[in-house]
Image (spheres, grey):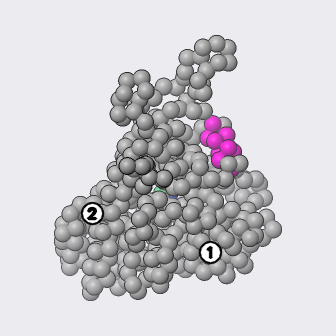
């Protein structure tokens, strides 16, 4: 049988960057747990001299992730925030960014409390429609930074439309694709220039590694990011890279199950009398359901709504009671692991977002966010049923 022109997503996830070890035939390449490399002569080495600059295990991960996102280069970092920091240090004092008003709390904190010290300015706008973004463009604007769906309000941005409007204005489009993963959404195919991830979440998927990555097909940007990776040094350990590679092999099957469980639970919550509103792009009454159908697709074209659900309980006290009564869902920060988690954004992930800012987009004291895991659906539903009835 002739080889397929481009192997499918799972074939790439399992094989790209991970040939059997040429020295021993080991099917799983070894972890290159080394800081330095023997040199044959003065200035003569095999492309590796020091592991901050290059490490074979890290390169395997980068090759794999670039393939999954459909980019030519990936640059791995020690956390999602380190990946974002590397991206920001690509820019210069005086540069301006336009960013979704409702993003990961740590991204908000980094821009408003750290990068502002270095003269990087940002405007926070509603990215569900193009007008606020277009009105915010200044002569110093260099890029737009998007999350779709947003965390935790699950609002969407039309990545294809925004990328094309940004390109016409000479701006880069940067997408945080952590919530969706390349299995469910591929922003580079939709026209974005840069994707970054907290690999801590779905990509690693087992809640045991902190990591990040930036992926692009812009060779100049990629070269600068590799230079920043080496120069500023926020690199992941070889062991963490190896664990992430191992986890990526099951990304497709995990996401299928996350997507399935979350869709069923979103319908269940939607019909529950103690839930006043459910935020999930796979519900037909989500204001951007049609956009979700269009841009959130598995590699073989099936709709993919992701594993994250937010819902309104009416008050902080209700949210507290429900969070405490849940037994299978663990009250914890983070998301994207095999185990189900419940999060209270106001006191947890989004505590650093000022009250007026968060209330302006509906992030209330009564909001809970679920990261739906891959446990048995019946157990997850029974857990919610018990806690909501309590
Ligand atoms: C967790 C997260 C980050 C930050 O990543 P870390 O690995 O925790 O540094 C950025 N963006 C999103 C959407 C996240 O969920």
Q: Earlier in the sequence, mark 2 or mark 1?
A: 1
Q: Give the residue pinned by disc 1.
A: 161
Residue 295 in sight here: yes
Q: Is residue 130 above or below residue 59?
A: below
Is residue 86 toward the left or the right of residue 208 in the image? right
Q: Position of residue 314 (x, y in %)?
A: 36, 82
Q: Is residue 200 left or right of residue 233?
A: left
* Label ID, residue 326: none
| Circles 2 and 1 in contact, beta carbons < 8 Å | no
Residue 334 magenta? no
Residue 207 visible (yes or no): no
Magenta span includes 228? yes
Name the residue: 54% across, 61% down: 176
Residue position for label 2: 329
Residue at x 54% of width, y 23% of height: 36
Q: Quadrant of the C terminus?
A: bottom left
Q: Residue reaching furthest top?
A: 41
Between disc 2 and disc 1, the foreground one is 1
- Per the image, label 2 sits on a secondary structure element best described as loop
Q: Residue at x 54, y 71 (%)?
A: 102
In the image shown, does 218 or 78 lie closer to the viewer?
218
For the point 43% across and 27% down, the residue is 22
Instruction: Measure the alpha-carbon separation of dots 2 and 1.
Output: 37 Å
Question: Which span is picked out in magenta?
Answer: 221-230
């Amino acid at each position: 049988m002739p080889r397929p022109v481009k192997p499918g997503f799972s074939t790439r996830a399992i094989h790209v960057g991970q040939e059997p070890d040429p020295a021993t035939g080991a099917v799983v390449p070894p972890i290159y747990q080394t800081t330095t490399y023997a040199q044959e002569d003065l200035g003569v080495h095999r492309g590796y001299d020091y592991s901050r600059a290059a490490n074979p295990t890290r390169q395997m991960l980068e090759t794999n992730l670039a393939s999954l996102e459909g980019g030519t280069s990936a640059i791995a970092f020690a956390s999602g925030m380190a990946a974002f920091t590397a991206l920001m240090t690509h820019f210069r004092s005086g540069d301006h960014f336009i960013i979704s008003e409702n993003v990961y709390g740590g991204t908000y904190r980094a821009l408003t409390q750290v990068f502002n010290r270095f003269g990087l300015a940002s405007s926070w706008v509603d990215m569900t429609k193009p007008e606020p973004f277009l009105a915010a463009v200044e002569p110093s604007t260099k890029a737009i930074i998007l999350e779709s769906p947003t965390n935790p309000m699950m609002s969407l941005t039309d990545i294809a439309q925004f990328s094309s409007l940004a390109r016409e204005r000479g701006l880069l489009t940067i997408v945080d694709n952590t919530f969706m993963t390349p299995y469910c959404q591929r922003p580079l195919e939709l026209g974005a220039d840069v994707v970054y991830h907290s690999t801590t979440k779905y990509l690693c998927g087992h809640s045991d590694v902190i990591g990040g990555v930036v992926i692009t097909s812009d060779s100049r940007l990629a070269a600068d990011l590799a230079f920043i990776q080496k120069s500023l040094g926020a690199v992941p350990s070889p062991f963490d890279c190896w664990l992430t590679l191992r986890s990526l092999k099951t990304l497709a099957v995990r996401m299928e199950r996350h997507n399935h469980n979350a869709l069923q639970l979103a319908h269940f919550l939607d019909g529950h009398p103690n839930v006043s509103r459910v935020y999930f792009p796979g519900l037909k009454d989500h204001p951007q359901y049609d956009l979700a159908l269009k841009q959130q697709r598995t590699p073989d074209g099936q709709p993919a709504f992701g594993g994250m659900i937010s819902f309104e309980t009416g008050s902080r006290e209700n949210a507290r009671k429900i969070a405490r009564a849940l037994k299978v869902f663990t009250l914890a920060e983070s998301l994207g692991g095999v185990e189900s988690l419940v999060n209270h954004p106001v006191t947890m992930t989004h505590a650093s977002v000022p009250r007026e800012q968060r209330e302006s987009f509906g992030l209330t004291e009564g909001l809970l966010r679920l990261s739906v895991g891959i446990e048995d659906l019946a157990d997850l539903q029974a857990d919610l049923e018990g806690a909501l009835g309590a």
